[in-house]
Image (cartoon, helix red, strand yellow):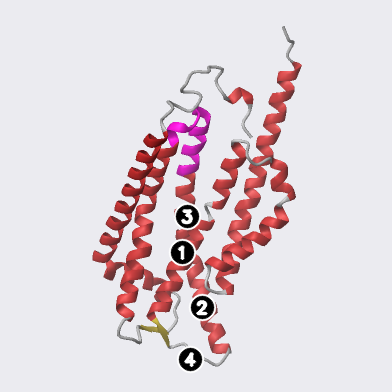
Amino acid sequence: MANEDDYPPSSSPEDEGGPVKSFLDHLEDLRWVLIKTVASVVLGMTICLVLAPTIVQILHRPLVQSGLDVKLNPLGPMGGFVIYMKVATYGGAGLALPFVGFFIGSFIFPALKPQERKYFLWALGIGGGLFLLGVALCYFFMLNICLQGISQMNSWLGFSTDLWRAEEYFSFVLLFMAGMGLSFEVPVIILTLVRIGLIPHEWLVKGRAYFIIANVLLCSIITPDALSTILMVLPVQILMEICILISKYWERQKRIAEARAAAQPKD
């Protein structure tokens, strides 16, 4: 939670969040944000459409590295087109995500106070890094374990594992990677809300059990199977515990600052 000492004593218009705009001006700014967002997504999809064969090879690599003797086949006349569009949709959204964040940030940023701007920039930078970390963790580590577990389960149930539908495989990989990246954004959002004072530290401690339940439910919706759900829940819960420790440190620093302010002699 932010301390009073964190804010400058000045009461200039800049400290109050920047110049005031009319409602129509805000609508015009919002319209351009939407236009730029759609344009960036379309451009990202176009790039992914051109690079679709290379992206398909990259997404196929975890299956090859898992050591499974499994072949992918569309098993239908529209299978290749479905894969093509899924790669373009997910890939385009992923490429456009930093630009979308920048456009939304440029719309919100002028209305924030200087201290809130600092937190927003930190959240944007750390959030982008955590998203990439979640995607990389999923691609290089979790997909290998999950694919082997799914193959062993199919064999245990008596099903053949030498041929998989290509559409379902790529949907599984894309959803798993996107879900892992987005789930790593939750701690950033929570810490930002704690830092600007919207969520007290006590709420995080008292609501830990509720967050575990919400984490399991959310991950089960995002992920396509139980094994990937477990693999996603564990790192997200670890990040949440780190958030509670950071919030505890901030709360301690706040109380120390308040005690020092109370100990100072008043005029």
Residues under numbered marks 1 and 4 in contact, where contact means CB atoms less than 8 Å apart: no
Query: Residue 177: which numbered mark, if any?
Result: 1
Residues under numbered marks 1 and 3 in contact, where contact means CB atoms less than 8 Å apart: no
Q: How far across and down, in percent of the image, does residue 249 sit?
A: 67, 37
Q: Amino acid at mark 1?
A: Met
User: Which range is magenta?
Assistant: 109-125
Q: Residue at x 38, y 48 (%)?
A: 100
Relative depth, front residue between 165 and 43: 43
Provide the residue designation for mark 2: 148
Spatial distance from mark 1 to mark 3, Cα to Cα?
10 Å
The answer to if 123 sits in the magenta stretch is yes
- Foreground disc of the pair 2, 1: 1
* SS at mark 4 in the image: loop
Q: Residue at x 71, y 45 (%)?
A: 203
Q: How far across and down, in percent of the image, does residue 98 sit?
A: 38, 49
157 displayed left or right of 76: right
